[in-house]
Image (spheres, rainbow, N blue to C red):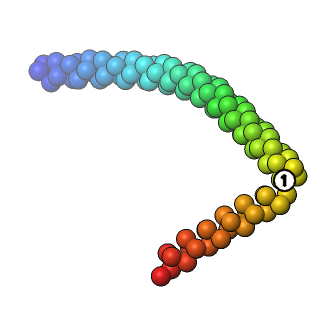
Amino acid sequence: MPAAKETKANEDLREEFEALRGEVTEMMALLKGKASAEAETITAKAEEKLEDYQEKVTDGVEAAYEKGAEGIEEISGRIRKNPVGSLCVAFGLGYIISKMMDQGKK
């Protein structure tokens, strides 16, 4: 009889283990579904932020380009108004820079 009790106990344990395994499998499936939904939400938020940053960068580059173009137009206008003075300034700056570069080599 003791063997019959052990067999019954083993069968009960096996049934409980199988039930537990089923519950764990269900929980894993639920967690996987929830994790997938969370991942989709996070991905959507990241894409949205990336698009916002991309727009900001594009706007910044366009603004910088416009400022640079305005600056070039202003300098161009000043050169046209006083070409001889501009030429003297450019020559003087070139001379100073060349002297500074020569001192670095010695």
Q: Is residue 24 visible?
A: yes
Residue depicted at x 51% and y 19%: 34
Establish if 92 lies above or below 51.
below
Of 101 and 91, the residue lying toward us: 91
SS state under label 1: loop
Tell me which amino acid carries mark 1: Asn
Residue depicted at x 73% and y 33%: 59
For the N terminus, the quadrant is top left
User: Residue 32's x, y, as percent?
Assistant: 49, 25
User: Residue 10's x, y, as percent?
Assistant: 23, 23
For residue 42, what is the image quadrant? top right
Within 10 angstroms of label 1, few (less than 14), some, or many (20 or more) residues? few
For residue 51, what is the image quadrant? top right
Relative to 91, 17 lies left or right: left
Residue located farthest toward the bottom when viewing the structure as drawn: 106
Residue depicted at x 39% and y 22%: 24
